């Protein structure tokens, strides 16, 4: 991909916990900028505000390096005052894009706070800061794990867009039909905003299977079996994963996806390898 690229590419980081981690991430970010020129980097936010400081610092560092940084902001367990203040800090910094989420209550933290769902956060951001922020929201082509039905989940997604979200990023998936069906369903409900597929590179089978169980992303049987068949052969898992995710990305782009959002897990190589393959 080069300057003529018409599809948006974004890359997600999580906030590092140590100064060494921060330095390592800075190098990863510099490599990604040089090699694949993403439109923006997003930075996750720990449930219940557990990484609030780390998210702020990581966003600040990316922003100061001249790249667009989009903080994730989850509202569960937060007060309006706290959210208002965080947004004020981001606005002051010059941040123009927010990924607005409900988040999940950490176990043992029983209080929802003043927000119950992401649509309320989107509405609050619009009410408090007008059009300053471009608001991204989450979408689930394979259904959010807590939704009562696909239909209800789609209605709830539509509510977030009606509340003022500009675009969406999906949970990752390995089944393109789920994405295209989802797009058809939400478009038939009048949604016209870009819905960018979230892409999880495959570099380790145990990590992927563990993650996917917890966030409700389905690993198709054929993929699970192939990964299990490689055992501890990391080189083969990586080579196979690169082929699978390259194909997935190509199919999504050919089918009209407006761009790709990479869950980088703070690593440069897997994302760069896939994007180079797309050339
Ligand atoms: P919502 O849109 O509020 O939906 C949550 C559930 O409630 C769904 O089942 C939905 O159908 C239902 N629902 C929604 N609105 C209503 C309503 N008005 N009435 C009744 N039911 C409703 N988590 C983090 O902790 N930190 C992160 O940085 C983070 N980043 C993410 C980035 C992306 C791109 C994605 C896809 C997910 C991310 N998550 C993150 C995970 C996310 O926080 C969880 O999936 C969480 O359970 C739902 O958040 P949401 O914003 O999708 O919630």
Image: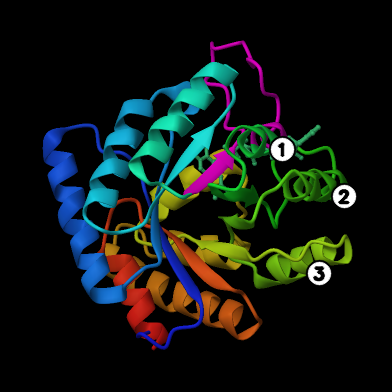
Question: Does the beta carbon of the residue at mark 3 sit less than 8 Å from ligand 1?
Answer: no
Question: Which residue is at a point 53% across and 47% down the rendered structure image?
Answer: 133
Residue 119 got which mark? Answer: 1
Could you tell me residue 176's position as x and y percent? 65, 71
Question: Which residue is at a point 17% across and 32% down the rendered structure image?
Answer: 18
Compare residues 270 and 19 and report the one nearer the observer: 19
How far is the residue under mark 2 from the one under mark 3?
Answer: 13 Å
Could you tell me residue 7's position as x and y percent? 51, 78
Residue contact at pointers 2 and 1, CB within 8 angstroms: no
Badge 3, how many Cα within 10 Å: few under 14, some, many 20+?
few
> Is 98 one of the magenta-colored residues?
yes
Q: Find the magenta span and give its range.
A: 97-121
Identify the image quadrant of the C terminus.
Answer: bottom left
Label 3: which secondary element: helix
Label 1: which secondary element: helix
Could you tell me residue 222's position as x and y percent? 58, 68
Compare residues 38 and 162 and report the one nearer the observer: 162
Badge 2, how many Cα within 10 Å: few under 14, some, many 20+?
few
The residue under label 3 is 184
Confirm whether residue 51 shows in the render: no
**Of circles 1 and 3, which is in front?**
1
The residue under label 2 is 151
Above or below, 86 against 1 in this view is: above
Q: Quadrant of ligand 1?
A: top right
How far is the residue under mark 2 from the one under mark 1?
Answer: 17 Å
Q: Earlier in the sequence, mark 2 or mark 1?
A: 1
Q: Earlier in the sequence, mark 2 or mark 3?
A: 2
Could you tell me residue 41's position as x and y percent? 37, 56
Label 2: which secondary element: helix
């Amino acid at each position: 991909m080069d300057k003529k690229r018409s599809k948006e590419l974004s890359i997600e980081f999580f906030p590092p916990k140590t100064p060494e981690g921060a330095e390592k991430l800075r190098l990863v970010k510099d490599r990604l900028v040089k090699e694949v020129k993403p439109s923006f980097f997003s930075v996750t936010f720990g449930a219940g505000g557990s990484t609030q400081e780390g998210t702020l610092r990581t966003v600040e560092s990316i922003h100061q390096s001249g790249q667009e940084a989009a903080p994730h902001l989850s509202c569960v367990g937060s007060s309006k005052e706290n959210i208002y203040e965080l947004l004020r800090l981001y606005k002051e910094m010059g941040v123009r894009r927010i990924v607005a989420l409900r988040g999940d209550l950490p176990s043992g933290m029983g209080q929802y706070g003043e927000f119950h769902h992401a649509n309320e956060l989107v509405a609050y951001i619009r009410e408090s800061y007008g059009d300053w922020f471009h608001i991204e929201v989450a979408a689930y082509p394979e259904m959010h794990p807590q939704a009562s039905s696909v239909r209800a989940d789609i209605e709830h997604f539509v509510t977030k867009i009606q509340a003022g979200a500009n675009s969406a990023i999906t949970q990752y998936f390995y089944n393109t039909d789920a994405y295209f069906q989802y797009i058809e369903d939400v478009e038939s409900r009048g949604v016209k905003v870009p819905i960018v597929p979230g892409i999880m590179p495959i570099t380790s089978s145990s990590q992927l299977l563990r993650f996917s169980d917890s966030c409700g992303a389905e690993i198709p049987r054929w993929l699970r079996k192939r990964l299990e068949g490689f055992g501890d052969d990391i080189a083969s898992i990586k080579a196979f994963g690169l082929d699978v995710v390259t194909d997935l990305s190509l199919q999504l782009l050919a089918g009209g996806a407006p761009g790709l959002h990479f869950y980088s897990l703070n690593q440069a190589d897997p994302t760069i390898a896939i994007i180079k393959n797309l050339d």
